[in-house]
Image: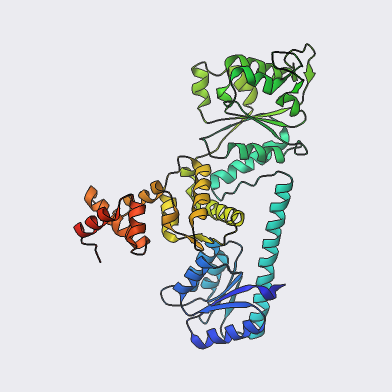
Amino acid sequence: MNKSARLLIVDDEKIALKNLEHVMKKEGYQVTSTQSGQTALNLLAEQQFDVVLTDLRMEKVDGMMILKKAKELDPSIEVIMITGYATLQSAVEATKHGAFFYIAKPFKLDEVRKVVKEAAEKVLLKRVNSELLMQIDEQHGKVRIITQNSSMLRLLETAKQIAPTDCNVILTGESGTGKELFARFIHFNSKRAGKNIVALNCGAFPEELIASELFGHEKGAFTGAAMRKTGLIEAANGSTLFLDEITEMSSSMQVKLLRAIQEKEILRLGSTEPLKVDVRFIAATNKDMHDEIGSGRFRKDLYYRLNVVTLHIPPLSERKDDIPLLCSHFIRKYSAAMMKNIRALSPEAADLLQEYDFPGNVRELENIIERAVALSTGSIIEVASLPSDIRSVGIKTFRRKKSTLPSLEEQEQEYIKWVMKESGGNKTTAARILGIDRVSLWRKLKKYGLEA
C-alpha cells in the first residue's frame, strides 16, 4: 500500500541526498528531492506529499522549520528527521513538534526503509479514516466543529456534557459564528440523534404564518387551508427543535410557545384537541437577551424556560488561531467540489486573513475561500484572489515598526509597492487590484520612483 506514497527528501549534502533518492525510488516511492530548505518549503506549499525525509541542520532553512511548515500545511503528513548531530534536546524538540521519527547519522539503509514504510502506512490509514468519518458524518447528517482554540474546545466539552441531559439551551453569538452547527452538535450527541433535527428561522416568517409553521393547522382553519398541515413542533416530536433568531418572535407567539414548552402539548390552528409532544428546544440569537428582556421585547418567563444552559459562541476575531485550520478545511472542501488541485494559501494571503477582523465570522471566511478557490488558477491561493477589502488590510501592517504613524502618502506608496510585488510586476493586474486604470497607476509609479 505504501509504494505509491509521495516522498520529499531534503538534505544539503549532495551525496547523501542522491543515495537516499536512489534507495527510495527502488522501493517504489514517488520521490522529489532538493538540497535547499527554502525550495522544500515552496514544494510543500505547491504539492501534496505523504512523507518528508529531511536533514535537521541546514543553512537558512533547517529541518525544524520544514517540520513546522509541513504540519501547518497538512497535519496528516509525517516528517522523519535525520541528523549527524543527534542530541536529546533536538530529539525532544522534533518529537514535540510532531516528528514521526528521529534518525542519527550514520544510519543503516534498512532502518530508513523500515521507518519510511511505517510512516507512509500511517499517513494512508489516517487519510482513509478521515474520508470514512466524513462519509459517515454526511450519511447521518452530522457536523464537525473545526477548532483548536482553547475557549471553543471548552465550549464543545460543555456541549457534550449537556447533550444527553435533554435540557433546553440558548446559544448566543454574532451572526456567522456557527450557532446552528452547535445546535446540531448537541442534537447528534444526545439520545434524540436517531431523528432529524428540525429548524426554524423565527425572523423569516410574518406573524400570521409563523403560528401555522410552528403549530400546524387543520383543513379549513383559515382561507387557503386546503388540507391539514403538520407544524414543526409536532414534526420534532421525539427530536430537537432549533429556533434561530428567537428574539424576532412576536410577543403573542412567545406566549403560545411558552405554553407549548410548559404543558408539552400543542393545538393545531382550527383544532380543539391538544397533542402531546416530547421536544427538546434549542434557541439562538445574535442579540443581548438581557437587553431584550429589559426593553420588554422578550418575555422573562419564556427566557427562563429556554435558558437552562446558555452557550456563548465567540466571534472569529477572538479565536484567530482557528483561521489557518478553517482555511485548510474550506480549501479542501471547495477544491474537491470545483475539481481543482489547490493546496494552500500563499504566506502573504495567509497573513492578510490573519489580520482581518471578519465581521461576518466563519460564514464570511468560508465565502472568501470559496471565491478564492474559484478565481485561483494555480495550486496556491495568492493575494490577488482575495476580495479588495481584505487586500486593503495590508495597508495598516506596513509601518508598524515605526514609532510615528505614517502619512496617507506613505501608506499609498508602500501599498502600491507591495501590490506590484504580489502581481509580479504586471501593471494590468496591479491596476485592477488597486481599483484604478493603468494610466493612473503609471503616474503614481513615476511619482514615487517605482517605475523599475
The correct choice, above or below, for 135 with respect to 1 in the image is above
Let me know if residue 189 appears in the view: no
The correct choice, above or below, for 443 with respect to 56 in the image is above
Q: What residue is shown at x 24% (from left), y 63% (from top)?
A: 451
Judging depth in this view, the residue of 308 and 22 nearest the camera is 22
- Give percent across and percent down for residue 63: 50, 73
Quadrant in which the N terminus appears: bottom right
Q: What residue is shown at x 74% (from left), y 47% (from top)?
A: 139
- Give percent across and percent down for residue 209: 64, 20
- Give percent across and percent down for residue 199: 66, 32
Let me know if residue 386 appears in the view: yes
- Give percent across and percent down for residue 266: 74, 18
Quadrant in which the C terminus appears: bottom left
Picture mark count: 0
The correct choice, above or below, for 67 with respect to 236 in the image is below
Judging depth in this view, the residue of 56 and 233 nearest the camera is 233
